[in-house]
Amino acid sequence: LGAQESKLLGIRFASKRPISDRIPACEEATRFVDAGWCFRGSVAPMYCLPSFIVAGAQKAATGWLRQWLSMHPELAQGGDHEIHYFDALPGAKDPLRTWATQYLPNFPATDATRFTFEKTPDYLPNATALAAIRTLLPSVKLVFLLRNPTSRAYSAFQHHCRRLRFGAELDGPSRTRLRGRNPGASTVHFRLESTREEWSRTEPLLPPCSPVDFDHFVVPRLNTTRLATWGLYARQLARARFPDSQLYVGFVETALAKSDTFLDDLVSWLGLRRFDFAKLPTFLDALGRTQLRRPGLSGAFHNFLMTVNLNMVHKHNVAPLLPLTKQTLDDFYRPHNRQLDNFLLYRAPAIAVFPPRKQATTNLTASVPRGGGVALKGTLLPSTWAQ
C-alpha cells in the first residue's frame, strides 16, 4: 500500500499485520482485504480475518485438529465449530458483498498478536466455495486432512444417520419398510439429496444405521452421491487453484498415529512458534478417544459426561462394512487414489504434505511394467488405502 492509501484507510501495521480503522467498501475489498487483516470493531476491540482455514475433508479428524490448534497461544478459533460461509453464500454468491457483516464478526480478537483460523471441511469438494475464498482471501493458507475414502464414506453415512438424514421408504398404510430385490435391502433416501416428495415417503433410520442400508444406497450412486464423490481428493485439490505454497495436505491415518510430530510440522509450516501439545491435560471419553480436558467446574462436568455417555456409545457402535461393499468402494477409489499420489509426488511437489515426501521411499508398492518384472514405486498413501 502507498502512504496516501494507508492514511486514507487509517491503516497501520502491528506484527507485520495491517490494522484498518474502517472496513473497506465492496469495491475496495479486492485491494484492501486479505487473510490476516484486522479491522477496528464497534463491539469487539477488533476483528481479524483468518490466516488459514482447515478446509477438509469431512469426517477426516478436522474437529480433532481444530480442538488442538485452538490451544496454541498464538491462535484463536473463529466461529463455533464450523462457519460454512463460503459454501452457503446468499444471492449471487459474491463474498465481497456480505463478508463484513456475515463473515468478519466470527473472528473477534483482543489484539493483533494472535492469528485467527476457521474449520469448515465442506469447502474442499465445493469448487464454488474455493473460488469465493480465493476472491476474498487470496493469500490464505489451506489445510486439508485426507482419510481413506472408503472408510470416510461409511463414516459420513453414519454421521448423517445420527442426524436422521437417512430414511427408508414405507409401504402405504402398513408402514412397513419396502424391500429391494436383495434380502435385507430397503429403498433408502438421503435427505440432502432427495426431493421433498421422496423424503415424505420415508421414515428416518435410527442410528447406528445398518451396513446393508449403506450398501444399497451408495453402490448404485458411486458417481452421484456426495458420500462417494467427496472422496475424490485429487480432483478437488487440482481445482483449488491456489498457489501450491499455500496448501498443506496431511494423511489422517499417519497424522493420528504420530500426532505430536504432525502438529509440530503443521505449526512450523504455519510460521508459528513451537508449542508442546503433549503437555496439555487429556482424558479418554466413553468411546476410548483422547479428548482435551476442559478447565473449571463446567469443564469438569463436561469431561465427566463424555466418559459416561452411553447414548454416544450406542450411536457409534456401528457394524463393520460388508466385505463386498468394501471391495466395491476400494475398486472405485483405487485409480483416484493413484491420481492423488502422483499429483502430490510429481505434479505439485510444492504442496506441503505429511508424512513428508522423503518418507515416500519407505512406502513401496509393486507394479508390473510393460516389459515384465516388478518395479517399485514410492507412495505417500497409508497402507490401508486402496492402491
Image: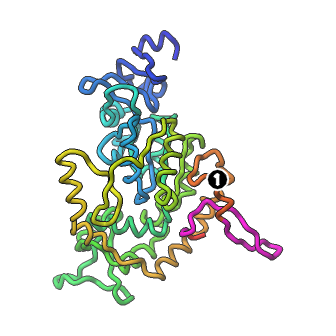
User: Residue 267 vs residue 372: left or right?
Assistant: left
Say what amino acid the circle numbered 1 marks.
Answer: Arg
Q: Which residue is mark 1?
A: 357
User: Residue 300 vs residue 354: left or right?
Assistant: left
> Quick one: which residue is furthest to the right in this view?
371
User: Residue 241 vs residue 110: left or right?
Assistant: right
Nearer-the-camera pick, 53 or 235: 53
Which quarter of the image is occupied by the C terminus?
A: bottom right
**Figure colour scheme:** rainbow
Residue 211 spot, x, y in % from top left: 37, 78
Residue at 36% x, 43% y: name it: 70
Residue 111 spot, x, y in % from top left: 35, 25
Residue 107 appears in the rendering:
yes
Crowd rating for badge 1 (residues with CA inside 10 Å; few <14, some 14–19, many 20+)? some
Tell me which corner region of the image, top left, top right, bottom left or bottom right, holds residue 193: bottom left
Residue at 34% x, 39% y: name it: 78
Taken as a whole, is the magenta stretch helix, strand or loop? loop
Residue 125 appears in the rendering:
no
Give the magenta-colored segment's residue range.
364-385
Task: Confirm whether the magenta stretch covers residue 367.
Answer: yes
Residue at 52% x, 13% y: name it: 2
The image shows residue 36, relative to residue 82, as above or below, that is above
